[in-house]
Amino acid sequence: MTGAESVLSGPRPEVGVTAGRLRGVLEAGVAVFRGISFAEPPVGTLRFAAPRPARGWSGVREALAYGPPPPQGGHFGMEALAQDAAGDDWLTVNVWSPQPDPGAGLPVLVWIQGGAYVIGTSGLPEYDGGRLARDGGVVVVTFNYRVGVEGFAQIEGAPANRGLLDQVAALEWVRDNIRGFGGDPDRVTVFGESAGGGSVAALLAMDRAAGLFRRAVAQSVPGTFFSPELAADIGAACAAELGLRPTVADLAAVTPGRLSAAADAVGATLDQRAGRWGRPAHRSILFSPVVDGEVLAATPWQALAEGAGRGIDLMVGHTRDEQRLFTAISGLLGEVGEEQAAHALQLFAPGPDGERRYRDAFPAAGPDELYELVHSDWLFRMPSLRLAEAQTAGGGRAFVYELTWPAPGMGGAFGACHGLDVPLVFGNLDRGQPALLVGEQPSPEAEELSALMRSAWTSFAAHGDPGWPVHDSGQRLVQCFDSRSAITAYPEERSRRIWQDHTFAALPLNGPE
């Protein structure tokens, strides 16, 4: 059965899915179901394999707790979170529905979290879908996917991009089951930020994902997609930390925690590998989707320009100060010198005269601003804009936005930084790490901006119209989200001109292009 009949039994909602029957809970008028297996645990004989559908069960299964996180890299305490969780049922989905009725036909928003492809779990408080579902009249779905070595390392004998294959499997589960939760399987929108935005971009380019969603929102899309050669070299380095080869035969018996630790050890020596791995090493990026020719046949920019997204509505955008958060984490906020700025420009600006073009375009910018500009542009801002341009070139519709509202939290030092959009879009302004940017007591201005952004996301999911004009190569109109939001010409025109001839190709082995 697909999306079978659902009923509300007193305060405990029940829903039938293809594998069995589930009992959730009502929270502030929203039916919530957590920790639903959409695939078998990828361990044992299924280690490093493509996901397989979850087995069925008899009776009614409680769906009250998030599933355990997948193995995590050693960042922000996430590895401890994974180690403390019981079980290996990593591949689970969570659903919030304001109307769990098979006839409701509500739009569906499916969230893909970020985390540099090395950390991330759907059970974090900032990803609670209750407010978005209740206020927006949509069904919200979040899920786990494999990250790090488990999900993205190039391993001989294993399919590439296992994390992306997990995402496809979760979307297939949504297609087959969401009607029972009140969702319309023909009105599914995927949305994600950072590595989640890169995943959305990859799904747009993947034949296996065709037909699984009608609309897509890509927030702060990273421009890092790896060539097979680069991915294989990084995978070999991770295996070598354990004295092993990067094969399923060698790695399948290694505990996930040891593999994650081996990748962390490689990550700690990236300065020694920059000559071989190029820009990703300079940005501590070990894993990204691999343009392997099978799971992912082309980069998203190439695929969309060739028409892969013609039948899908796309909304894409970025924050103004993408790099600011990373500069602060590295202790360089306000401390970047001329030598560091020049090195960043030489390394990341496009073309042989990229540094000069930045200095000419931003003559009043000091070292701090130039450093942040080129990092923001290379990693997030220009890849996001160019994704919209590729969609338009391929005959599809794209809507562009930029978040320019400066975060009031932490003394206002972070500006409109990377990740600020997450609490605003979910409406979770008082929980989770990103909510620290908004401040301990969210202001009326923050609440108003959050309501505006949530309305745009849910309107786009429902009707394909977020409330501003389609992007084109003439006017280049975008929605700027700020204390006074407005539709305006793209604000980062100087950066756009610098990057307009650059091709975001799969990153190669043996250093920068």
Image (cartoon, rainbow, N blue to C red):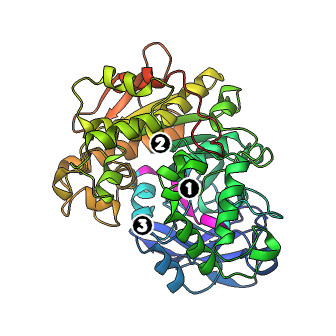
User: Nearer the viewer's eye, disc 3 or disc 2?
Assistant: 2
User: Mark 2 vs mark 1: which is more N-terminal?
Assistant: 1
Above or below, 451 relative to 83: above
Secondary element at image label 2? helix
Q: Which mark is residue 29?
A: 3
Secondary element at image label 1? loop
Residue 276 lies, in percent from the top left, at 61, 50
Magenta stretch bounds:
136-149
Q: Residues within 10 Å of mark 2 (few under 14, many from 20)?
A: many
Q: Which residue is mark 1?
A: 273
Amino acid on which disc 1 is placed:
Arg
Query: Is 383 included in the stretch rendered in magenta?
Result: no
Q: Is residue 381 left or right of residue 42?
A: left
Amino acid on which disc 3 is placed:
Gly
Query: Is 146 included in the stretch rendered in magenta?
Result: yes
Question: Which residue appears at 24% of the width and 44% of the height?
Answer: 406
